Image: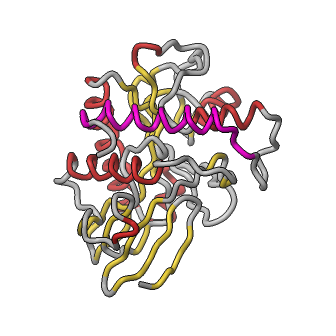
């Protein structure tokens, strides 16, 4: 194998005509990799993503095998097709939180989509919205509008990206709600397998999505979470300026974060951990 890319959280290896995508235990917040790993994180996210890929099997995806990987990466890696990635982060929002909340508070809209007045933090939106961003290899992704995606990719492709994003999110969020989990928002990545638009990277994990316990949802305040928002909130509380280097994560935050990832996996899949 040949190591060809190191992302914030994942490493990519070339192995013949396919790729090995390996999820590390690194954790990234505000696009900065923190120096402390979260044990089992890579395996938990990989197994959760694999479960969702099976759930959405009718959507073309990049997975070739979840088991045909080098032994040292077992459980945290998948063998995938090489794709020509679309340079857009495809984000769906069903609830108002994070950067979407901040933009709404400034402008009354998110990514050019006007929203009703008077919405609070954590409010459910009238319907899910497509709020894409740039796909930055370093630094921060920047919000863009649907029209920006049209200019970059053409209208037909932009509409397919939007429709796929909203469809997968809506169906996944409906399933999660039955399991007591609110998926407030999520991010997808797509690429081209020949002329087939194909779902890649990860699907509805608690790293790429905001997972909230449905029983604790209360608009008008920050929400309890099963995802890395817990680490974001802790990092913010330290007074860190969100620029590299990030702060070391204390042991009690590491343990709590690991527990949240594990609980999210078990609620969604109905399977005990370890898998």
In the rendered image of this protein, does residue 108 appear above or below residue 38?
Answer: above
On screen, residue 239 versus residue 136, left or right, reads right
- Vertical placement of 79 versus 150: above or below? below
- Please give the range of residues in magenta: 248-271
Is residue 250 inside the magenta stretch? yes
Name the residue located 35 percent from the left edge and 38 percent from the top edge: 265
The chosen color scheme is secondary structure
Quadrant containing the N terminus is bottom left
Q: Is residue 130 visible?
A: no
- Where does the image place residue 51, in percent across and percent down from the top left? 26, 47
Look at the magenta stretch and give its main secondary structure: helix
Residue 77 % position (x, y): 37, 63
* Left or right relative to 28: residue 181: left
Asked if residue 102 can be seen in this view, the reply is: yes
Residue at left offset 42%, top offset 65%: 154
The foreground one among 232 and 91 is: 232
Pinpoint residue 93: horizontal percent, then vertical percent. Answer: 46, 35
Q: Quadrant of residue 35?
A: bottom right
């Amino acid at each position: 194998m040949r190591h060809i890319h190191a992302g914030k959280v994942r490493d990519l290896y070339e192995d013949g005509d396919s790729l090995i995508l390996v999820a590390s235990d690194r954790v990234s917040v505000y696009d900065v990799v923190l120096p402390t790993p979260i044990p089992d994180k890579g395996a938990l996210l990989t197994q959760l993503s694999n479960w969702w890929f099976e759930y959405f099997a009718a959507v073309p995806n990049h997975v070739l095998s979840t088991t045909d990987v080098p032994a040292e990466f077992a459980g945290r890696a998948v063998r995938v097709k090489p794709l020509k990635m679309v340079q857009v982060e495809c984000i769906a929002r069903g609830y108002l939180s994070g950067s979407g909340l901040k933009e709404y508070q400034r402008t009354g809209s998110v990514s050019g989509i006007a929203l009703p007045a008077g919405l609070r933090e954590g409010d459910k939106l009238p319907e899910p919205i497509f709020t894409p961003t740039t796909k930055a290899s370093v630094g921060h992704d920047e919000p863009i509008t649907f029209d920006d995606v049209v200019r970059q990719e053409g209208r037909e492709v932009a509409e397919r990206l939007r429709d796929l994003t909203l469809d997968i999110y809506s169906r996944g969020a409906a399933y999660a709600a039955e399991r007591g989990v609110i998926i407030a928002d999520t991010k997808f990545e797509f690429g081209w397998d020949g002329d087939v638009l194909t779902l890649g990277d990860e699907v509805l994990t608690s790293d790429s999505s905001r997972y909230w316990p449905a029983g604790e949802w209360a608009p008008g305040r920050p929400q309890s979470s099963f995802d890395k928002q817990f680490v974001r909130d802790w990092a913010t509380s330290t007074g860190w300026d969100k620029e590299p280097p990030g702060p070391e994560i204390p042991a009690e935050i590491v343990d709590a974060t690991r527990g949240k990832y594990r609980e999210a996996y078990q609620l969604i899949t109905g399977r005990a951990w370890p898998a």
